[in-house]
Image (tube, grey):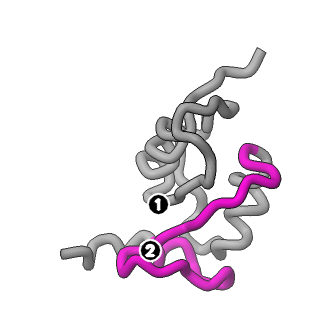
Amino acid sequence: MAKKMSVFDFEKRVWEIEGIRIFLRLSPRLMLDAYEFSNAANENWSVMEWINKRLKSFVRETPFMIIQGDGKEPRKNKKLKTVRESYNMEK
């Protein structure tokens, strides 16, 4: 049986592993399959590539947002490296 984690813990785990902030439009206490990746996705992947190769299998049809450092949603063709670097500019 797959490990489970709360939505809150899932969002936190994605941040810790991927360096990307996501927000799922679900109750924070709802349980999801655990995000079990241990290494960040390739920095040259686009946001859409990351969604398709990693995130979609966990969130399926759940509405979600990816937020970059300026508080905006990145375009789907933006590189993960650029999104990750955007958080360093937060102040």
Looking at the image, the residue that sits furthest to the top is: 1
Q: Residue at x 73, y 48 (%)?
A: 59
Residue type for callout 1 = Arg
Determine the residue positioned at 53% across, 57% down.
23
Residue 52 to residue 24: above or below: below
- The outermost residue toward the front is 27
Q: Which mark is residue 21?
A: 1
Q: Is residue 77 magenta?
A: yes
Q: Secondary structure at mark 1?
A: strand
Q: Is residue 84 left or right of residue 29?
A: left
Q: Bounds of the magenta span? A: 58-83
The number of numbered badges drawn on the structure is 2
Quick check: 16 left or right of 61?
A: left
Residue 66 in the image: x percent, y percent?
55, 67
Q: Dot 2: few (<14), some (14–19), or many (≥20) neighbours within 10 Å?
A: many
Q: Position of residue 36 (x, y in %)?
A: 61, 34
Please tell me the numbered disc located at residue 89.
none
Q: Tag 2's secondary structure?
A: loop
Q: Residue at x 62, y 54 (%)?
A: 25
Magenta segment's dominant SS is loop
Q: Identify residue type, mark 2.
A: Gln
Instruction: Tell me residue 37's x, y (percent).
Output: 60, 40
- Decide: marks 1, 2 in contact (CB < 8 A)? yes
Position of residue 49 in the picture relative to residue 25 (left or right): right
* Badge 1: residue crowd in 10 Å (few <14, some 14–19, many ≥20): many
- The label shown at residue 68 is 2
> If you read the primary sequence from the N terminus, does the residue marked by circle 1 or circle 2 appear first?
1
When asked about the image quadrant of residue 46, the answer is: bottom right
